[in-house]
Image (cartoon, rainbow, N blue to C red):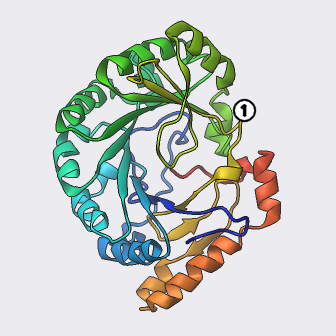
Amino acid sequence: MLEDSFGRRVDYLRLSVTDRCDLRCSYCMPEGFKGYEESENWLSFDEIERLLSVFARLGLKRIRLTGGEPLLRKNLPDLARQLAALPGIDDLSLSTNGTQLAKHAASLHKAGVTRLNVSLDSLDRARVRAICRRDALPQVLDGLEVARSEGFRLIKINMVALAGTTDEDITSMVTYCMERGFVLRLIETMPVGATGRDAGFLDLRPVRERLRERFGLVDGVIPGGGPARYLVSSDGGFQIGFITPISQHFCETCNRVRLGVDGMLHMCLGQNDCVDFRTPLRADCSDAELEDKLRAALHAIRTTYYSTAMNLTCISRQPFQT
């Protein structure tokens, strides 16, 4: 079992397979950003498979493929197939902005990806264009319809709640998800980096109560590894989650770490420390050395980081990594 120094069980890894993205969302990427990692520094599929097999032997159960935009990584279904076959991994999912989903949904599902999280902040084309700095809505909606026809076990829509920008779109998004069987998740912006701090914070607590009353929703629990608090319809046919890192933080129940495409393991978004796994992998280290390095990384999370993250005073120290 993987545990950090606070006794929190870590069984969930967010794996970035690329830092590239074909959108330029205003709350995520600074305009004109060009600070991408060199591709020769990316972990290869075989390096990823070997490292995650070590993680799985120590208790990793869930893997989520992320980016940047993960569907920009060439031959991604091949990696998905490798990871889905690892002993101990019982959940393989993918987060995407949806622009490439129509092309890849079938091959991803066949490779073993069972769940999708698709970012969609509005159903208004002009608004999406303003947020993403690209005219992306038609491609995303097409991708969602293709994915729905492929029979993924669960499709979630991630909607970032931006004050004064998308709060009025929430009701229409609820209706859209109800009609298609999608789970909706509303996400508060985090003040991570300049883009996050400038995005505009919308407290989701009053939004939650308004939606509860309007749609007759009740408190519910949805199986999964994430931090969302859910409301569900009385018949159980619709679920909406609220991810509230600012108004109702959830550090005490965190169960995940993040592996960058460069092989750097990030234990917490609220700290700058990371651990390099690329160098030992390419130095032909043993699996036992990788295991020791992972355990040491988890136990190095310091009390000062944990307590300040709980108070949300150190969140803005580093750029956001999905």
Residue 29 vertical position relative to residue 125 in the rendered view, above or below: below
Residue 305 vertical position relative to residue 2 in the rendered view, above or below: above
**Image position, residue 153 (x, y; %):** 29, 41
Asked if residue 152 lies left or right of residue 258, the reply is: left
For the residue pair 8 and 144, the one nearer the viewer reads as 8
For the residue pair 268 and 36, the one nearer the viewer reads as 268
Residue at image location 45% in from the left, 38% down from the top: 24
| Residue 189 visible (yes or no) | yes
**Image position, residue 312 (x, y; %):** 77, 45
Question: Which residue of the protein is positioned furthest toward the top in this rendering?
Answer: 214
**Image position, residue 85 (x, y; %):** 27, 67
Residue at image location 22% in from the left, 63% down from the top: 78
Residue at image location 52% in from the left, 42% down from the top: 29
| Residue 125 visible (yes or no) | no
**Image position, residue 154 (x, y; %):** 33, 38
Asked if residue 314 lies left or right of residue 145, the reply is: right
- Mark 1 — residue? 247
Q: The residue tagged with tag 1: helix, strand or loop?
A: loop
Residue at image location 41% in from the left, 54% down from the top: 64
